[in-house]
Image (cartoon, helix red, strand yellow):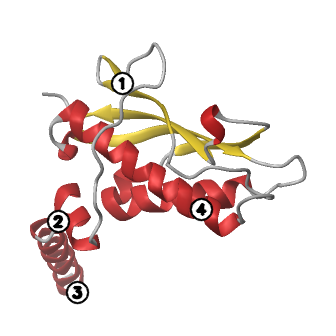
Amino acid sequence: MKKTLLALGLLFFTLALQSANAQTPEEKIKQLGLVIPEVSQPIANYVKWRQVGNLLYLAGTGPKVYGKVGADLTKEQGYAAARETGLEVIAALQAATGDLSRIKQFVKVLGMVNATPDFTAHPAVINGFSDLMVEVFGEKGKHARSAVGMGSLPNNMAVEIEVIVELEDQ
């Protein structure tokens, strides 16, 4: 009985310590030395995001990296392009919410890779985005995801990513 109580006490102490040391996404971004860009303007007739209830839908966005993965770019360069796209997504989330701590969880991600027909490592490329979301948002950054290849993307960008997040109640 004493061992059980001691174990429970240690568990509650550990959880309280973790909670006290929890970082906001903004603090994590600073700690990682990341630079969040300005939100880019839409390249056509659409909006960058739309909120419906507690869901925030982000339009597809991509990096300033151009070319086809498997021809012009390596898998590793595609990964870096997806990570750069993650910074664009964080910028849009910040602009849309005013506070990244309002994000309850990432729900769904669609990652599109501008790839040659024989390239098959689409998930490895989009991991650049997914890894960054987990680095910044922790468990809240994990998401359901599709990673697919495309014959082309707007302006020949390397990747395009769409995101749906759930927001905390206000």
Q: Is residue 33 above or below residue 150?
A: below
Distance of label 3 from label 2 (alpha carbons): 28 Å
The residue singled out by tag 2 in the image is 22
Work out which quarter of the rendered image holds the C terminus and state it.
top left
The residue singled out by tag 4 in the image is 79
Rendered image quadrant of residue 20: bottom left
The residue singled out by tag 3 in the image is 3
Q: Secondary structure at mark 2?
A: loop
Would residue 132 appear left or right of 114 to someone viewing this image?
left
Label 1 crowding class (10 Å Cα cut-off): few <14, some 14-19, many 20+? some
Distance of label 1 from label 4 (alpha carbons): 24 Å
Q: Are marks 3 and 2 in contact (CB under 8 Å)?
A: no
Q: Secondary structure at mark 1?
A: strand
Q: Secondary structure at mark 3?
A: helix
Tell me the residue at 12%/69% (across/down): 16
Would residue 118 appear left or right of 106 to someone viewing this image?
right
The answer to which of marks 3 and 4 sits earlier in the sequence is 3
Spot occupied by residue 144 in the image (x, y as percentages of width and height): 55, 43
Q: In this orientation, which residue lies closer to the viewer: 44 or 31?
A: 44
Rendered image quadrant of residue 54: top left
Q: Are marks 3 and 4 in contact (CB under 8 Å)?
A: no
Q: Secondary structure at mark 4?
A: helix
The three-letter amino acid code for the residue at tag 3 is Lys
Q: Which mark is residue 49?
A: 1
The answer to which of marks 1 and 4 sits earlier in the sequence is 1
Spot occupied by residue 137 in the image (x, y as percentages of width and height): 32, 56
The three-letter amino acid code for the residue at tag 2 is Ala
Disc 1 versus disc 2: nearer the observer: 1
Q: In this orientation, which residue lies closer to the viewer: 10 or 123?
A: 123
Disc 3 versus disc 4: nearer the observer: 4
